[in-house]
Image: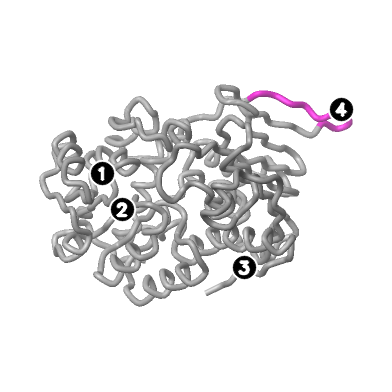
Amino acid sequence: MAVTNDKPIRVAIVGLGFGAEFIPIFQAHPDAEMAAICRRNRAELDRCGDKFGVAKRYTRYDDLLADPDIDAVHINSPIPDHAPMSIAALKAGKHVACTVPMGTSVEECRAIVEAQRASGKVYMMMETVVYSREYLFVKELYDKGELGRLQFLRGSHQQDMDGWPDYWPGLPPMHYATHCVSPCLALVGKPAESVVCHGSGRIREELISKYNSPFAVETATFKIEGSDVVAEVTRSLFDTARQYRESFDVYGSLKSFEWQQIEHEQPVIHTKGLPEPEIPRRVEVPDYADRLPEPIRKFTQPTAIQDAEHLSFVQGGGHGGSHPHLAHHFLMACLGRQPAFPDAETAANWTLVGIMAHESAMKGGERMAIPRF
């Protein structure tokens, strides 16, 4: 955890597609200063800077890291850049918030954990699902004992990535699995220890050649350290007909929570009846804006985001109101008021479930241990 202080954290945002949605949140937060933005394309950099009134602008990441007036960087760059940029920032003495996943290999995840330990700075993976109102609702039920004993967990993230740029075509489904892995592990509060995964179906030949990954769908089950609970997650990215779904189900001895099947429905709570049958009912998940400083509470609602056109935000339905919670928690970690969540070790575990799951699928379902650092 960082040393406690009361000075505003001077934040720079790197990557201004999805990342631009966080600018007004940091601008409104009482403990932050929106210090700088960074993007390679000068015209797009200036367009964003003019729109949000951010004066300090960088086209070179190295120049940003050399700026002593920046305390923290929030990285929203393409997936292949996550690890190199995170490591460089930690070595430059900056706190790091990075969008998912942490990295693309065991080696990258290990290097980030080691860099964070050596620097003493905060590293936090900005996983949206564990700050979504749905997760906060289920966590509250579990903490109150209303779910009873956890019996099984399931996550699903199905998305059509056709038309997305650069590195996305043909990406192995499980290489981008933290959205469905994270709520399972966060709820139990323990790391995954091993995983078994099977691939199913086949994507187009021109997509297979990108990563030598043939599967349309990958489904994994993973064991959780020190727990008798097993979790299952399913991912698809191409050539599978399914409306966007980023979901999790939680089965308890007293109550169970099931994500809605289609957009704009409400989730279902199943309550065990004694001796009557189980009772299902639709529930309205509350907002948790009251957990935030007043100036950023409005950002739990998609209508408050000033730059919500990015496809990840539109398809994700606003990511469950998670953005201000993420920003607030990161700032509190930088100020030393609470630990980062997920921190580097936890982020590595959540990311490596997917990386090792894909390796398992490529080996015909062989059980793979999750490396620990």
| Mark earlier in primary sequence (4, 2) | 2
> Which residue does the image show at 73% across and 32% down from the upper left?
270
User: Disc 4 designates what residue?
Assistant: 276
242 up-or-down from 9: above or below: above
Residue 138 appears at what percent x and percent y? Answer: 59, 40
Q: Nearer the viewer, mark 1 or mark 3?
A: 3
**SS for tag 4?**
loop
Circle 3 SS class: loop
Q: Residue type at mark 2: give it.
A: His
The dot on residue 26 is: 1
Discs 3/4, front: 3
Answer few, some or many: residues within 10 Å of disc 1's Cα (few below 14, many 20 plus, some between 14 and 19).
many
Q: What is the C-alpha distance between the residues marked 3 and 4?
A: 42 Å
Which circle's residue, 1 or 3, is located before the other in the chain?
1
**Residue type of the residue flagged with mark 4:** Glu
Spot the residue most to the front.
206
- Residue farthest bottom in this picture: 118
For the point 43% across and 33% down, the residue is 318
Identify the mark nearer the N-term, 1 or 4: 1
**In the rendering, at what x and y percent does residue 243 appear?**
58, 29
Query: Contact, CB < 8 Å: mark 2 with mark 1?
Result: yes
Q: Earlier in the sequence, mark 3 or mark 4?
A: 4
Q: Is residue 150 above or below residue 298?
A: below
Disc 2 target residue:
74
Disc 2 crowd rating (10 Å Cα; few below 14, some 14-19, many 20+) is many
Q: Are marks 4 and 2 in contact (CB under 8 Å)?
A: no
Which secondary structure is most common in the magenta stretch?
loop
Compute the Cα span from label 3 to label 2. Answer: 27 Å
Q: Quadrant of residue 209?
A: bottom right
